[in-house]
Each structure stands twice: as C-alpha cells, then as structure tokens.
Image: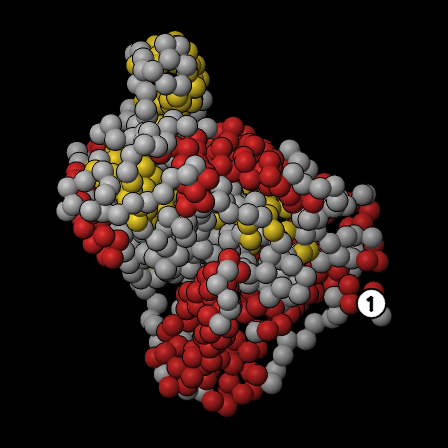
Amino acid sequence: MDIESILKQMTVEEKAALVSGTNFMYTNPIPRLGIPSLCMSDGPHGLRKQTEGGDNGISKSEPATAFPTAVATASGWNPDNLKKMGAAIGRECRHYGVHTLLGPGVNIKRNPLCGRNFEYFSEDPLLAGVMGAAEVEGVQSQGVGVSVKHFAMNNSENYRFMGISVASENTIRNLYLKPFEYIVKHAHPATLMCAYNQINGVYCSENKWLLTDILRNEWGFDGVVMTDWGAAHDRTAGIKAGLDLEMPGDTAICRRQILDAAQDGSLPMADLDQACWNVLKWIEQYVKPADTTPVDWQAHHDLAGEIAADCAVLMKNDGTLPLTGREKLHITGELFENMRYQGAGSSMINPTQVTTAAEAFQRRGIRSVSLTECDTILVFAGLTDEYESEGCDRENMRLPEKQLKMIDDMIATGKKVVVVLFGGSVVELPFNDRVSAILNMFLPGQNGGEATAQLLFGERNPSGKLAETWPMKYEDVPSHESFGKTLQEVYTEGTEVGYRYYQKHGITVRYPFGHGLSYTTFTHSEWQKNGNTYTQTITNTGSRFGGEVAQLYVDGELKGFDKVYLQPGESKTVTIIVEEKEEKAWPDTYIVPNLPKSYPITLESRFTDLQQSFMGRILFNAVLSVAKKQMKKADKMPDSPEKENAKKGALFLKRILESNSLRSMSMSAGQSMPWHVANGMMEMANGHLFKGIKCFLSPVKVPKLPKEENAQ
C-alpha cells in the first residue's frame, strides 16, 4: 500500500470517514481506493467476536476459549503463561477474521472495590507492565494487533464515563503511566485505547500532553490511538491532540465537526492526514484473510487449565492440603457446580466448553458425604457477577453474607474446613484464623475446575503469588473514604498504593503482596549485587516438585522477578538486571477543581441524574426498560449456559446505562441514539419541552459514507 499516494487521492469526506469506526467493531472501508475494513473484537483474556446479526451486547458471540483473567494470570508471576495465552488468542482471532484484539487492560489496581479489577493485573506497575507486554507479544506473534487499555488513570467504574482523576504529575508518571510505558517500549503494541475519564480536567481523548507529548514524543509510540467505545468529545480537538480513531463510530456529529473544521481551517490538514496515515499503516500491517484451518480447541482448553493451575495462590494451609482422595469430604457452596470462571462485562466470552470443579471431582470418583459422616469440609465460595462487574464498583470488600454464614456454620461443626475462593477482587476474610486452608483460584477460565481438583488433590503444586495486597479490612485502604463516591477522584495518597502504603505506615495486612504457599519448601540465598545485576539461588528443600518466585525489591519497590521450577533437592540461580533509568523529580502538586453542579442536566451528566426531574425520570425509565426487557427474556429461557450469559448481558447493560452520560451514550450507540436525540433528552430533562422537540427534529447532516456511495 502506497500510503502517501493514497492520502493525496483521498477527499476530506473520505478522510473523515477513515478516522471514524463503523458497525461497532470495524474501521470504515474506502472502496474507491481499495482500502479494506479492519475488524476488532473484545478481549483481553479471550476473544468475544460478535456473531452475525448480534446486538453488539455481550451475548451472541462466537465460541472461543475463556482463559484465566488478568487477576489470575498476574498471580502466576510467569510471563510465559501470557505469551502462550496471547498466541492462542491470536490464533483464534485469525480463525474468525479478527485483526486486532481489544486488550490487555493494564490499569493499576488503586482500590480493591474497582468493579473491573478482575481484568487488570496488579497494584504494581512493573508486574503489570511485564505481564501486559508478554500478552501483547503473544497475540502479535500471530500477526494480530492489540489495543492496550485504558490510557490512562481509569481506576474506577462508577463514574468512568465522565469522571475526573486529579493527581500530581509525579503520581501519574511514576505509577499510573508506568505499565503503559513498559509495554510501549518493550512490546510495541499496534494500538492504544484512550480512557473515558478526564485527567486534571482534560478528557483523555483530547489530552495532548498524554497522547502526543508523552506517548509519542517521549516514548516513541508510532501506532494508532483509538477511543474507548464512546469516549470521544470534541472530535477536532482530539485529532489535534493525537487521537487517530473514534470508536465505535457511525456518529454524524463527529464527521460533521471534522468536515467543518477542515473547511474553516481550524483543523490543520496535516493533523488529519497524520491520523489517516496511522490508520492506513495499521490496516496495511494487520488486515489479512481469515485462517479457515481448524483451531485445536481442546489444546487451548488444556492450556487454559495449565495456566490456571500455575496461577492459583495457596493463601493458608495447616497441612490439610493436599488431600489424599481418601478423606470423607462434605462439599458445599454454589460455586462448586456453578463455578465462576470469568468476569462480567465486555470481556465475557462464549466458552467452547466449561469444566467445573463438580465435573472434575466426578471424573475422579470423589463424592460428597453428609456433615453426621465427613472429616473434612470443602467450601466453594467467592464473588458472583452480582457483586463485581464492569460498569460499577463494589459497595464493600465483603463476601456475600449468606456465604459468610455458611462458612461460620461449617466451622462450628469442629471439622477441618478448606475454603476454595473464586472471584476477581480482594475480599475481607473474617474466618481466616478459623479454617485449615484457603486456596484462591481467582477467575480461572473455562478449565478452572480441572485445575482446582489438581491442586486440591496434590496432582499439581500451587505456585502462585498474590499480585495485590489483601488488607485486613477495607478501612485500611488509603483511598477508602472517597473512592467511587463522586465524579471526582482525588489521588491524595500519591504513589502510596498497595504494598508501598502498608509497608511505609506499618499497617498489618491479611496477606502481603507476593505471598503464596506451596506443598514443598524453598530456601533463598541473599541477593548478590554487581552493578545493576542481582543474583539469587533458590533451592527446593522439600519432597515435591514445585515453582517458586524470586522477587527483588530495592528501597521497598519491586524491581524484578523470575519464576523457577525445581525438583526436590534442585537449585537454580536467577539473574535479574535492573533497568537503569534517569531519575526525574516531577511536580508533586495538583489543583482540585470545584465539582460541577448536578443540575441542570448537561450532556456530561451521569444518566442517573436525569431522575431529578419529572420528564427526566420518564426518559430514564424508558431507556432502562431495554435492559429490563432483556432480563425478562433471559429469565424465560431454559436453564443453560446461554441463559446465564443472557442474564449477565442484561445486568451489564443495566449497569452501563446507569453509569453512562448522554454524550457517551450517543457516541457509542450510533444511529440508535444520535447526537440530536441526546440533546433533545437533555433539554427535556431540564424542562425545556419545545427545545427538546426541536432537537429531536434536527438531525445532523453529513455526506454518505464511502461504503454507501460504492453500494449505489
């Protein structure tokens, strides 16, 4: 593709179309010039390719492998897991004709209540960066691009569509940008996805300091910057700031803004051409025909189980684990048969198959006996989709009350109690000191049940380490008083997030960052330093094969790690080279702006704010009825995985609608809620009936898209 020649031939209308998406997951083709459409699909721990005729929701997607989510894979401390997983996902992308995967998500886990923490790696920027880079390398090894997200400071869900992240430059650069910087410099991702939120009062989608000064000029990124779905605001300001592609597109207002600004000169043609150049280069590199050869789905299922087993963390064990298989077990808890293996939201995958813990036990001939018969109790507990999901933050850090009561009841029997945890986030463990063992499987993917059985019965040895701190209680978290409660998130704790905070202030935690037990024992020699090179010898002093992680901390901060696997009596020396970086002192001050008033309603208001007026309540309920209808339809379906996915989809839609703004709804809904309708709803919610009607009758006019011109 001769990009320079093509650019010279393109009309302004064609350029405006090229930097706008279409049909929710595609770039606009330019048939006249032979420019094809590029296909994207959600990730990041598997492929969610929408089926033909799908509703662009999170149901009705092609079968794909649901791998362990980031909360699990990060706990493996093994980048090779992510490379293998990424390569397998990339292979499935090629099979379905997907050119770019939307992921991985590498945002820092600032607070354990973030509803999307299951999709992020860690509270530590190095661990998040290394794991994210490994997944990027794996996916892109298959000739499929990625979109690293959400750039940047998207650390909560309640107000993510319009929230204001307020922090000092020192905090932003030395913590929240670090994973992105590492990935850009080490793995060269095809694209980055900018977040919805504002940083110090400027939306990420039009933040030149973020998208150009830092990302391109300092880090050397030369790929495409796209919006999160519906994150565009002022489209011409975005292009001038370094934003190339608006997704999902089909927004007449954005094309109108580009065309008008190009005509009056307020948008330099050089800026529009640069955005087009980046998109064309991306299309040239990644658009290829689908690979129709069969995918080895069983091999990918097996791989998902292997990774899950390597990532699980044995948090506590008094010697009860591993089980021998001869115990008289009483097995309880809804997650035994209905294992939660993935999170809820846009990353939800239609799995090729699912192996639950119940099925894995059945294959081994393990059955549950009554409580008047057992000697050991297995409790399968954890967070369900009702308690954590994309689109909202959790209300507290507790397990469901009915589960806590069940665990207390089991402890009261005096029998040994082993708790198997599933879930994507940190929870309080009030029963910790009264149970014999806690095995944390996190969200282990579609073969997580097999991995669970392997670990419980000693067929595999747990080797995961916590990628985030588990506090004693939520009140110990530095941002606990204000997190997720208002439009404005002030990062008063600075870089003191996670283990940095607890160590500095001497706060006792339930389980520290990097913690994880094994069925064998290891010794670590003292670190030996030679310049910026550190070495340590690890020896397996126990009787089982197992994995162990060397963790190097310098001045209380993780600077490197390496995972080794050792036979009994075997030793290995690990070498870690700490990257030398020029230390810079960035400004450590910030200004807290005044919060905007909740009324009158603006295009940036949270959709729930519409309920402040009579007309607004009518509009709010009308929109929310879509989700209610989906839930009623799902409830009528026969019990099946499809029913569960449909219910999850309806619940997610409800949460997204409630937390959206009129602007982001318009920017993500295409022709179903165009710009003039959003404006009309705003006016009517403010009591301006006739202004609202006028808006409804005044659609934005733009030329036909190039693909529509060609169709004639």
Q: Residues within 10 Å of mark 1 (few under 14, many from 20)?
A: few
Q: Nearer the viewer, residue 260 or 427?
A: 427
Left or right relative to 683: residue 404: left
Residue 644, percent from left and from top: 47, 60
Q: Is residue 126 above or below residue 523?
A: below
Q: Quadrant of residue 298?
A: top right
Asked whether, in this view, residue 230 is left or right of residue 360, the answer is: right
The residue labelled by disc 1 is 711
349 lies left or right of 581 = right
In this view, 135 is above or below 534: below
Report x, y in % for residue 231. 52, 59
Q: Is residue 677 above or below residue 21?
A: below
The N terminus is located in which quarter? Answer: top right
Residue at the image point whose x is 34% and y is 39% from the top: 440
Which picture quadrant has residue 362? top left
- Residue at 59 percent across and 73 percent down: it is 672
Between residues 571 and 30, which one lies in front from this camera angle? 571
Res. 655 image quadrant: bottom left
Kind of residue at badge 1: Ala
User: Is residue 581 shown to the viewer in this render?
Assistant: yes
Asked whether residue 533 appears in the rendered view, the answer is no
Q: Nearer the viewer, residue 559 or 475?
A: 475
Q: How is the image coloured?
A: secondary structure
Q: Position of residue 431 (x, y in %)?
A: 19, 44
Residue plotted at (48% across, 53% down): 195
Q: Residue furthest bottom?
A: 690
Q: Is residue 672 left or right of residue 373?
A: right
Q: Quadrant of the C terminus?
A: bottom right
Tell me what residue is drawn at x 70 percent, y 72 percent. 702
Residue 709 lies, in percent from the top left, at 81, 67
Disc 1, SS: helix
Residue furthest front in the image: 373
